[in-house]
Every structure is written in structure tokens, then in C-alpha cells.
Image (spheres, grey):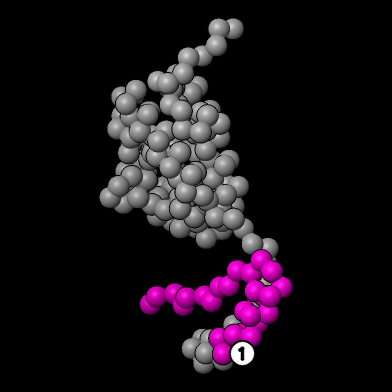
Amino acid sequence: MSKAKAYINTAATLQESMAAIARLPGIVTRAIQDWGRVDIVVRPHEEKRSLDQNRLQRLWCREAGEQGDMTAEEYRGQMKLHHGVPIMRRDSEEFAEKYDRLIKWRPYEEKLEFMQSPFDFPVTRGMNKQQKTEYLNAVYVDLTGRGFRLTDPGLKGIGPDQYREAAA
């Protein structure tokens, strides 16, 4: 049985909020007919991870793949398992339950496989902007700590082959 799809509306202004409220009677009527009881929740909006963050993650994995002994996809899986999973287990009870039930008990090599294509267990996809920033910081520290040269996000896309470190 599939889970019922929630009705979600994001509003940044009073006018947008009032427009959403105007649609609420019809939405609530339909929801009660479909589901019986409903929860109505108002909460602060969390920024989703950005496309720039997603591109940077892929770029760093590609750079690690070019410099290391694994493919970009293998580094992506390793980073998701080592850094993404702890963040999501800490912050999401739903994620922790699913991860613990389906993956946690498996041998390390199988966990890595589940993080990669074709399985691609959703880890970073569920992150908000703050979580993705924490994740990227951990990935950067991990990979540069192993000696990989990664594109510095502060250099706006200038790759490690396009600059030289200043002498200490």
C-alpha cells in the first residue's frame, strides 16, 4: 500500500499565506474524505540543498576518481556511507529506521554497494541546505586529508589544475 501524499505549500509573504489558506477548505475536505483524520502543521521552512551543492559533490567525487584508486561512483558511495549516513541518522527518525532495518546490519562492502548505483540508497537527496553543507565540509576534510586536490568552492569553479598553492 502506498503512503498518502501530503499537501504542502510554502509561503514567504502574508499574501502567499492568505492565498494558501483560501485553498485550505477544499484541501482539508478532500483529505478527510480520503484519510479520515489529518494533522495540520505550520512549521519553519527549511531550505533544500542547492544545485551548486549537488554539482560540487559530484565534482569532488570525479576529482577523487581521477586521482585515486576507485571510481567517482565508489568515492560517492563511500562519502555517503561515512559522512551522509551519520548526519541523516542523527536528524531523521524515518531515515534511521529504514537504514537500520535494511542496511546497518550488512557487511561493509554490501553497505557500500547500496550507496552506489544502481541501488543508490537515498542519503544526500533527503538533506536540507544546512545538512548538505555539513556533509560537504566533512567530505572536503576527508578527501583533502588523504591528499586529494579538490576544487575549492570559494574559488567559484577554478579547479586544482588551474592554480598553485602559495609557499608557506
Query: Which residue sits at x=46%, y=18%?
Result: 163
Residue 22 horizontal/vertical position (percent): 64, 85
Q: Is residue 115 left or right of residue 52?
A: left
View extreme (left): residue: 118
View extreme (top): residue: 168
Q: Which residues are magenta?
A: 1-28
Query: Which residue sits at x=55%, y=11%?
Result: 166
Is 21 included in the stretch rendered in magenta? yes
Query: Which residue sits at x=37%, y=45%?
Result: 115
Q: Is residue 27 above or below residue 99?
A: below
Is 32 included in the stretch rendered in magenta? no
Q: Is residue 34 above or below residue 90?
A: below
Residue 113 horizontal/vertical position (percent): 32, 43
Instruction: Give the residue at mark 1.
Output: 25
Q: Nearer the viewer, residue 115 or 124?
A: 124
Q: Nearer the viewer, residue 38 or 103?
A: 38
Q: Is residue 47 above or below residue 5?
A: above
Q: Is residue 80 left or right of residue 45?
A: left
The C terminus appears in which quarter of the rendering? top right
Residue 52 in view here = yes
View extreme (right): residue: 14
The N terminus appears in which quarter of the rendering? bottom left
Residue 81 in view here = no
The three-letter code of the residue at mark 1 reads Pro
Residue 99 horizontal/vertical position (percent): 45, 53
